[in-house]
Image (tube, rainbow, N blue to C red):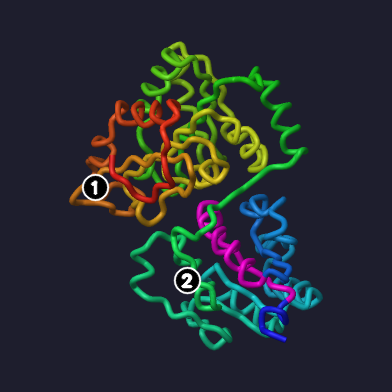
Amino acid sequence: MSDKENIKRILVRVPNWIGDAVISMPGLHALKRLYPGAEITVLAKARTLPLYLGKEPVVKDVIEYDPEGRHSGLAGKFRLVAELKTRRFQMAVLFQNAFEAALIAFMAGIPRRVGYARDLRTPLLTGPVKFEDTIAKKHQVFYYLNIIKELGLGVSLEEMELPIVSTGKEDSERAGAIMEEYGLGADSAMVGVAPGASFGPAKRWPVEGYCEVIERLCGERGMTPVIFGGADDIEVSTALSQRLSKAGVDHVNLAAKTSLREFMAIAGKARLFLTNDSGPMHVVAALGAPTVAVFVSTSPALTGPIGRSVKVLYKKLECGPCFKRECPHEHYNCMKTITPEDIYNASTSLLGGCGIEANSGSEA
């Protein structure tokens, strides 16, 4: 019996952040192609776990890793190890880089443990994957696909399956109730906007710019703006909401008012979505919503959204991308080089039905 036939139960420790989790999904799909007869279970924190619900046949089951609750402290880690032992996994694939991820798989007695040889965890892995500098210079999707390549399946960009997230009937019903509560009809020409980025202000294109674009889209296209964001985005979302109100633009502010699944169900109905480089950006691109993504301090060549209806705006400066939380020069020139006109033109190209291919780093 071949290795592929022997492996029936695989545990995948997925990344902790929403954007990283979405980017890693092509790696999950490739793993399923390599082991079609295996059941894949993901171990995920609460913030990313909802992304994996309803992903059968790729993901069979999900286990929540709760390091702040039932899995906190030494006793909690032993509790998690005991839970994993009962599942009798035959292989662990570690998309998450921490030493702890390898240690837990080792303590759970999982015979094969594959992941990057980083953070002093090489002795805990049966299949350590060497981290090459060339990987760090490619789009992050290849960081995860490279692990699967080491297992025996190389996947090119052309062969890669796009990340897909989906919602179910209950999610749609809850989303419908929220939309009805805020006066959003099922046929609303909704333009979603995610003005936040929890990493820091250097990733947030100015709200006054978003306001200008939205005003124009509403005036010329009759669209209905809906603001999205998490608890970390309340301040910037409120600032945008106030500007829209002052401009006389009717809108809905749903920042911190939806779960991730509810956000997915509502945002998936958007005719257009405007967003900074953030977790929501990757989610809406994976949902298939027409997405305009604004990159300022980060690089779309490394973490650009992957989707069939995506337009990336980015203008490289001598000082960028800096990957800083705040502008080290205090001038934020990367934001000034991208204009509301740029975003409006990108928006109309998507709304006009132009074919926009998956984009991981085009410049505006």
What SS does tag 2 mark? helix
Name the quarter where the N terminus is drawn: bottom right
Q: Confirm whether the magenta stretch covers residue 120.
A: no
The earlier-in-sequence mark between 1 and 2 is 2
Q: What is the crowding at mark 1: few (fewer than 14 residues within 10 Å), some, or many (at least 20)?
A: some
Q: Height in image: 11 above or below 171?
A: below
Q: What is the crowding at mark 2: few (fewer than 14 residues within 10 Å), some, or many (at least 20)?
A: many
Report the amino acid beneath label 2. Asn
Q: Height in image: 293 above or below 29?
A: above
Residue 64 placed where, x, y %? 71, 60
Point 49% across, 33% down: residue: 273
Point 72% across, 56% down: residue: 56
What SS does tag 1 mark? loop
Q: Is residue 38 left or right of residue 16?
A: right
Point 45% across, 64% down: residue: 156
Residue 239 versus residue 104: which sits nearer the camera? 104
- Of all residues, the one furthest to the right in this rendering is 86
Residue named by callout 2: 146
Residue named by callout 1: 316
**Residues in magenta, as a range:** 8-35
